[in-house]
Amino acid sequence: MCASILMVSLTALSGCAALENKETHSTATAAASGTQTSLAAPRTEPRTPAPNPPPSIERKPPIGDVSLGIDDRGDLGQIIVDSTGRTLYVFSEDGPNEPTCYGECADTWLPLLADADPAGGIGIDVAAAKIVPRRDEGEQVTYRGHPLYRYAGDQTDRDAHGQGLDMFGGEWHVLTKFGEPLA
């Protein structure tokens, strides 16, 4: 009798071990093949995704002499750029000569600041290039009444990644050579 109880116990234990081994093998196979199992996998992505675009590491945009120019950007046509060739943008929520992008918005969309009215290259109407006061200090460059910004997501002077983005309650567009937002 003791032998039969011992035999039943061994059978039950080996059955449990086989079941556990099957689950472990299934989990390992699923992990290798990329399929999900009912077991929770460790979290690998960050809890809070990085802002897209990342805010500028320049907390205060540079201030100084500014010159506006026109550059041909292929599909975008001829657009307004700064003296370094960086693409400039306008915000649909700004009023004429009234910037509205402050705080987090201005960390991503850097206002183009100057200490005097900007100069202009060929094709720029210098009389339409002005500066207006900002409520967070500084003077922001405008063209034909549109406050101008740089986009932190543009890494080079040929980038125009901000064109058509809908962020901070409005749309962002490059400015055509005629001083109109490119829709």
Image (tube, rainbow, N blue to C red):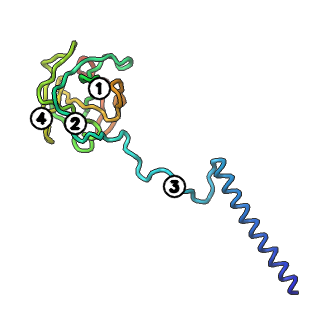
Image x and y of residue 34, in percent: 63, 48
Say which element carries label 2: loop
User: Which quadrant is the C terminus positioned in?
Assistant: top left
From the image, tell me which residue sits under label 1: 86
Say which element carries label 1: loop
Image x and y of residue 178, in percent: 24, 17
Indicate the amino acid at tag 2: Pro
Say whether residue 104 is left or right of residue 118.
right
Which numbered disc flags the more N-terminal residue, 1 or 2?
2
Number of the label disc, if any, that sits on residue 61: 2
Real-space Cα separation, disc 4 to disc 1, in angstroms: 22 Å
Q: Quadrant of residue 171?
A: top left
Indicate the amino acid at tag 1: Arg
Callout 2: 10 Å neighbours few (<14), some, many (20+)? some
Image x and y of residue 14, in percent: 79, 70
Real-space Cα separation, disc 3 to disc 1, in angstroms: 39 Å
Task: State how many labels appear.
Answer: 4
Indicate the amino acid at tag 4: Pro
Which residue does the image show at 29% across and 20% down from the upper left?
Answer: 79
Say which element carries label 4: strand
Which numbered disc flags the more N-terminal residue, 4 or 1?
1
Say which element carries label 3: loop
Give the answer, above or below, for where 141 lies relative to 18: above
Real-space Cα separation, disc 1 to disc 2, in angstroms: 13 Å
Labels 4, 1: front one: 1
From the image, tell me which residue sits under label 3: 43
Callout 1: 10 Å neighbours few (<14), some, many (20+)? many
Give the answer, above or below, for where 135 lies relative to 90: below
Real-space Cα separation, disc 2 to disc 3, in angstroms: 37 Å
Image x and y of residue 176, in percent: 27, 20
Indicate the amino acid at tag 3: Arg
> In the rendered structure, are the residues bearing label 1 and label 2 in contact, judged by CB atoms less than 8 Å apart?
no
